Amino acid sequence: MFEGSSPDAIGGIVDDVEVINTTGCFGYFPHTGIFQHNSVCASPKCASHNQPRGSRHNVNLWTAGKNTASFDEDYYASNIWVEDSYIYDVCDEDEMKVSWEYEDGVYTNFGVTELEEFTPRTPPTANLPWDVEW
């Protein structure tokens, strides 16, 4: 998620990201000037999956909105460019939107297509020395 608390929060790149088994995948609240390329939203958690901690009635896979919660001014997302990105194994249409934007035109490009098959990459691992005695 890109979250900007100022109109000066501009720019960012999301490249080659896989998001799997979440209630939403990509959020821009608010931010302007994001470029996203070659990303995947796969197997989102849907309301019909009867999640133990609950789920939203309607899942938004890509979201671009505004932030008015704790600021004196409204800040809006704008100029979000998504290309060559994909969805896989998504919710039924009645409980999901591929994209939601606060107002038309927030996404200046939205190039997302559905994959017929998808094999996630092996996630990176890290061996950290948490138990090392000094």
Image (cartoon, helix red, strand yellow):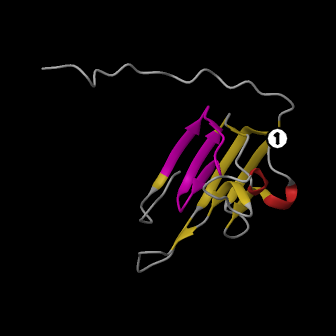
Q: Is residue 85 magenta?
A: no
Where is residue 18 shown, x and y percent of the image? 63, 34
Name the spot of residue 4 as percent of width and height, x first: 46, 60
Residue drawn at the location 83% of the way across and 28% of the way down: 117
Assign the C terminus to one quadrant of the image.
top left
On the image, which quarter does residue 106 sit in?
Answer: bottom right
Query: Residue 108: horizontal and vertical position, in percent?
Result: 70, 55
Furthest-bottom residue in this view: 72
Query: Which residues are drawn in magenta?
Result: 11-36
Q: Residues within 10 Å of mark 1 (few under 14, many from 20)?
A: some
Q: Say left or right for 101 vs 123.
A: right
Residue that sits furthest to the left in the current view: 134
Q: Quadrant of residue 71?
A: bottom left
Residue where numbered disc 1 is placed: 113
Secondary structure found at label 1: strand
For this rendering, which residue is in front, 114 or 95? 95
Instruction: Please tell me which residue is depicted at 41% across the width and 75% down the height of the picture.
Output: 70
Q: Please state which of residues 3 and 109 is positioned toward the viewer in this rendering.
A: 3
